[in-house]
Amino acid sequence: MSKTPEAKDWTRSAENDRLVIRNELLAEEKPWSMIAFHAQQAAEKYLKAFLIRNGERPLRTHDLGGLLKICTRFDDGLAGFAEDCDALTEFAVDARYEDFIEYNSEPVARRAIAASDRICNALRERML
């Protein structure tokens, strides 16, 4: 998929996050906030892999919208994922803390998964 070893490492790690999501969805008890967190992580890692694949050193950030803006320099068709990126960014940190109980719900996690899948699949196709 990715031509550089570093980009390949990022995509492999992203696919591991996606595997965690699939496995957790099969569990009897589902940690919805952690599922949302892994959805964010998968999208972030695919964005960073795409940047590396295009010769750009990604920022050390969880701001998916900011990463996406840089990605659009190489493919302006990615601009359509801005809303998904903005929606996922909040799960990078907040979803890991119990006082953000609103993230620990099935509908929120399923929206995060759907947004992440759209981003990951689009970037994966572009890196084949």
Image (cartoon, rainbow, N blue to C red):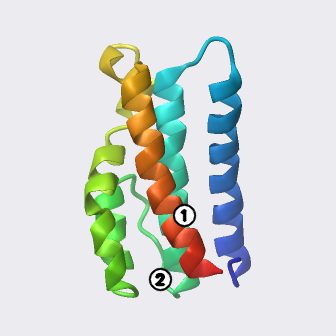
Query: Residue 75, position in %: x, y?
Result: 38, 85
The label on residue 56 is: 2
Q: Residue at the location (70% across, 84% down)?
A: 3
Query: Residue 29, position in %: x, y?
Result: 62, 12
Q: Residue at the location (33% across, 53% down)?
A: 84
Up/down of 33 relative to 117, above or below: above
Q: Residue at the location (36% across, 46% down)?
A: 88
- Quick check: can you spot residue 72? no
The quarter of the picture where residue 25 lies is: top right
The label on residue 121 is: 1
Give the number of the mark in front: 2 or 1: 1
| Numbered disc 2: secondary structure | loop
Please state which amino acid type lies under the numbered disc 1.
Asn
Q: Is residue 66 left or right of residue 91?
A: left
| Numbered disc 1: secondary structure | helix
Q: Looking at the picture, tell me which residue is in the foreground, 118 or 39.
A: 118
Q: Is residue 49 left or right of residue 110?
A: right
Q: Is residue 60 left or right of residue 8?
A: left
Q: Quadrant of the C terminus?
A: bottom right
The quarter of the picture where residue 30 lies is: top right
Q: Residues within 10 Å of mark 2 (few under 14, many from 20)?
A: some
Q: Earlier in the sequence, mark 2 or mark 1?
A: 2
Q: Quadrant of the N terminus?
A: bottom right
Query: Residue 115, position in %: x, y?
Result: 41, 49
Please state which amino acid type lies under the numbered disc 2.
Glu
